[in-house]
Image (spheres, coloured by chain):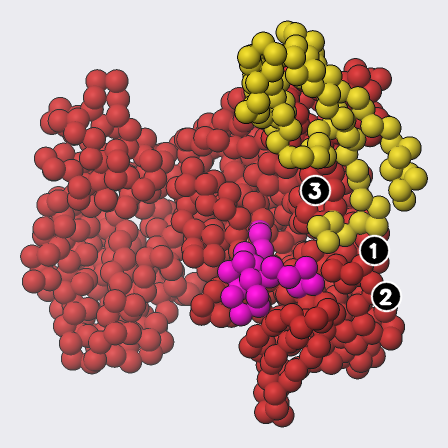
């Protein structure tokens, strides 16, 4: 394999050249067997740098190229596409002499190491095969998991572009958290008024198959070809026949709390979570219903004139093949029972932010009136506590991002409802970074005369019909004691526990807060590590509505980029199993983080190339050493080690 | 206050009548009552069986579905639905 290898050493300004003696690296490499040419340049990735490579390949008749520069994660694509014009792109390799050398070593050692790294790359390059990209067919249909604002937006964007979407929602209606909110900051427009048109658009869109009251129970496959199983839970009411007249609800004798109203308003066992629900239909709560045997209690069925109720409905499993998946499973509030310092939130007059949101809502339990829950009277003194569970090492260490804004909104709305009331807000810092957010906070502070107290609350306890709040004002250094009628906790936001289950099915990591882990925190904030899986909304991190909508559209555009092609091109650096020698032990099958290793009917392992990300875990784990990574073969790696050691 | 509503929803009530001496202790009513209103009593009836009794002294939990009277093989139990007018008077 006598090749004429060209070595191009990059200065990267002073990033490399300031530490590594680049001229010496080139000089040493010129003497190395197989290397026909070596030079240096200021910025290899610049246009003149790329042109230099082109020119030298022609002049020196090179048939392989090494760029000694930054990490291949940065510019491998750039240089391979240059080389593609002349020969197979897998004859181009990068030696990382920046991140793994000049940035972490001192001058003398760095130069020595750089020389070794480039020489090792020469050895690897000599063992490289010419590879062709793998092509994978695509099913141009997208699965969106979660029907909140993020899921709705993503589904609409993809459907508007002309592709089919399956929108799966666990609850009886789409709408999610946004449907529960009263008004949205900073413009104070009614949350439902701006959300419901989108919900209706989803229901009407010919490209969207809405599967509410359903759950994703199994996902297998890979980008372009995911096989999904969706459990359609029985509503016991025919969605199309139900006219939402409400006669069944009147007849139903079972009364239980409505989850949509944070359990502060009663509902019947046959219910519609809120009037604008989509799909617009009643649902029988299987747990609460007296018995689905019509003999026991059939009062709803007797009352239903449309004859929409069917107690014999069965759960159904629907199988679908999709090309891409968007996870938009949303958030939950941190469990207030874990907040020891705030009385475990057991008191009627200590409520969470979402409960207060329902209280403010015109369709909520109080019809929009603000009350002190223990007495039903108007509260004259309200204390809002920010960061309840957030920015707290004992609870959740992160900032929940939206609490500063919605607490300001809460206080403002309280003052509008109760002009002679007093509102206090305990805060650590005010984080109002969105567009027009700071102006909103200033308006609340100045015009509405809300008392902002910088400091944390140490203790809350009941004294008679008042809730006593002990805190400290860290700006004056004085202790504060407020006898309040109502305390509202701005609870930390956590990912839903269902997110964890979905993440498990998708083999995506979640962090301590149950938030999905993105591929790159800055440059790939909507992508999962596995291709074809994208995130939107609070499932990935706490965020406000505009950010959730933006991320949903971003995820949709990523899906559309996949769907714009007829076949997917994939890096062919995958695992290859020597089937003749495979003993069928299955270690690789169980260890593969991408589910790419599968057992064939004959018991032997097989690599699904479309799934394989080339991580090499299987190759390392195979007890009989029968798995090799293309272009990372054992002999290549051994030779590299020899040069370095 | 469990619910924040001004007018609480009131479930319908049924009054349970047990004709003790007809009971032959099959236990169907106890087994199938969806609200779990009934339990076996310790007393004996004329036939020597234990007739059912209410779990709680008042029968507030009974919502008057009437399933017990429907399945009782001896026609020993029946329900009278309490009319809602009463509630309105109480309001």
Report the span colored magenta: A331-350
> Which residue is identified by label 1?
A368
Q: Residues within 10 Å of mark 3 (few under 14, many from 20)?
A: many
> Which residue is identified by label 2?
A417
Distance between mark 2 and mark 1 Cα atoms: 9 Å
Mark with earlier residue (2, 1): 1
> For the point 49% across and 53% down, which residue is it?
A515
Pointers 3 and 1 within a single chain: yes
> Which residue is identified by label 3?
A258
Q: Residues within 10 Å of mark 1 (few under 14, many from 20)?
A: some
State whether residue A620 appears in this view: yes
Label 1 chain ID: A
Q: Are marks 2 and 1 in contact (CB under 8 Å)?
A: yes
Pointers 3 and 2 within a single chain: yes
Q: Which chain is red?
A: A
Mark with earlier residue (3, 1): 3
Distance between mark 3 and mark 1 Cα atoms: 17 Å
Does the magenta run of residues contain A336?
yes
> For the point 80% across and 59% down, which residue is it?
A376
> For the point 17% across and 26% down, which residue is it?
A584
* Left or right: A282 in relation to A326: right
A224 over A317 or under it: above or below: below
Q: Residues within 10 Å of mark 2 (few under 14, many from 20)?
A: some
The image quadrant of residue A412 is bottom right
The image quadrant of residue A219 is top left
Residue A625: image x %, image y %? 11, 37
Tell me the shade of chain B.
yellow
């Amino acid at each position: 394999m006598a090749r004429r290898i060209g070595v191009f050493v990059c200065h990267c300004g002073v990033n490399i050249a300031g530490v590594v003696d680049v001229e010496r690296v080139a000089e040493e490499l010129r003497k190395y067997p197989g290397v026909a040419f070596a030079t240096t340049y200021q910025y290899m990735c610049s246009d003149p740098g790329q042109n230099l490579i082109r020119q030298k390949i022609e002049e020196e008749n090179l048939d392989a190229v090494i760029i000694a520069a930054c990490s291949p994660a940065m510019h491998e694509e750039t240089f391979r596409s240059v080389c593609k014009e002349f020969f197979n792109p897998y004859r181009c390799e990068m030696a990382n002499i920046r991140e793994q050398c000049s940035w972490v070593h001192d001058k003398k050692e760095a130069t020595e190491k750089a020389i070794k790294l480039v020489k090792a790359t020469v050895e690897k390059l000599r063992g490289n095969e010419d590879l062709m990209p793998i092509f994978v067919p695509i099913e141009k249909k997208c699965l969106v998991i979660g029907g909140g604002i993020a899921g709705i937006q993503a589904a609409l964007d993809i459907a508007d572009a002309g592709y089919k979407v399956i929108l799966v929602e666990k609850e009886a209606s789409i709408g999610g958290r946004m449907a529960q909110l009263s008004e949205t900051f900073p413009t104070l427009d009614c949350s439902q008024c701006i959300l419901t048109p989108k919900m209706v658009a989803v229901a009407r869109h010919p490209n969207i198959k809405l599967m509410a009251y359903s759950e994703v129970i199994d996902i297998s496959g890979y980008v372009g070809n995911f096989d999904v199983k969706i459990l359609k839970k029985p509503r016991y009411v025919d969605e199309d026949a139900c006219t939402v007249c409400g006669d069944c609800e009147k007849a139903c004798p079972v009364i239980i709390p409505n989850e949509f109203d944070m359990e502060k308003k009663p509902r019947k066992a046959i219910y519609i979570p809120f009037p604008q629900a989509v799909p617009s239909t009643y649902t029988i709560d299987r747990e609460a219903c007296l018995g689905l045997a019509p003999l026991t209690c059939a009062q709803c069925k007797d009352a239903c004139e449309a004859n929409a109720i069917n107690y014999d409905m069965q759960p159904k499993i629907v199988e679908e093949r999709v090309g891409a998946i968007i996870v938009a499973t949303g958030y939950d509030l941190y469990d207030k029972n874990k907040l020891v310092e705030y009385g475990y939130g057991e008191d009627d007059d200590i409520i969470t932010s979402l409960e207060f949101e329902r209280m403010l809502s015109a369709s909520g339990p109080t019809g929009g009136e603000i009350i002190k829950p223990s007495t039903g009277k108007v509260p004259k003194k309200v204390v809002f506590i920010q960061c309840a569970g957030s920015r707290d090492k004992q609870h959740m260490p992160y900032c929940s991002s939206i609490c500063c804004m919605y607490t300001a909104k809460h206080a403002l709305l309280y003052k509008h409802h109760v002009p002679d009331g007093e509102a206090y807000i305990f805060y650590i810092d005010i984080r109002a970074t969105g567009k027009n957010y700071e102006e909103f906070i200033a308006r609340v502070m100045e015009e509405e005369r809300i008392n902002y107290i910088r400091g944390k609350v140490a203790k809350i306890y009941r004294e008679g019909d008042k809730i006593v709040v002990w805190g400290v004002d860290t700006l004056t250094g004085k202790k504060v004691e407020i006898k309040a009628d109502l305390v509202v906790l701005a609870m930390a936001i956590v990912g839903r526990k269902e997110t964890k289950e979905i993440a498990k099915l998708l083999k995506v990591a979640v962090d301590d807060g149950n938030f999905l882990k993105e591929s790159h925190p800055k440059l790939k904030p909507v992508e999962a590590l596995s291709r074809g899986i994208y995130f939107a909304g609070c499932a990935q991190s706490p965020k406000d509505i505009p950010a959730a909508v933006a991320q949903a559209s971003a995820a949709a555009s990523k899906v559309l980029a996949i769907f714009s092609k007829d076949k997917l091109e994939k890096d062919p650096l995958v695992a290859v199993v020597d089937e003749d020698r495979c003993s069928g032990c299955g270690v690789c099958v169980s260890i593969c983080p991408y589910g790419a290793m599968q057992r064939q009917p004959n018991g032997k392992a097989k690599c699904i190339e479309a799934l394989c990300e080339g991580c090499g875990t299987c190759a390392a784990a195979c007890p009989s050493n029968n798995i090799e990574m293309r272009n990372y073969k054992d002999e290549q790696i051994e030779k590299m080690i020899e040069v370095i050691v | 206050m469990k619910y924040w509503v001004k007018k609480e929803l009131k479930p319908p009530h049924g009054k349970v009548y047990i004709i003790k001496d007809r009971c032959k202790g099959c236990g169907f009513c106890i087994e199938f009552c969806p609200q779990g209103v009934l339990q076996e009593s310790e007393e004996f009836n004329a036939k020597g069986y234990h007739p059912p009794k209410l779990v709680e002294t008042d029968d507030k939990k009974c919502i008057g579905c009437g399933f017990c009277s429907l399945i009782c093989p001896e026609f020993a139990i029946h329900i009278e639905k309490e009319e809602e007018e009463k509630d309105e008077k109480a309001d």
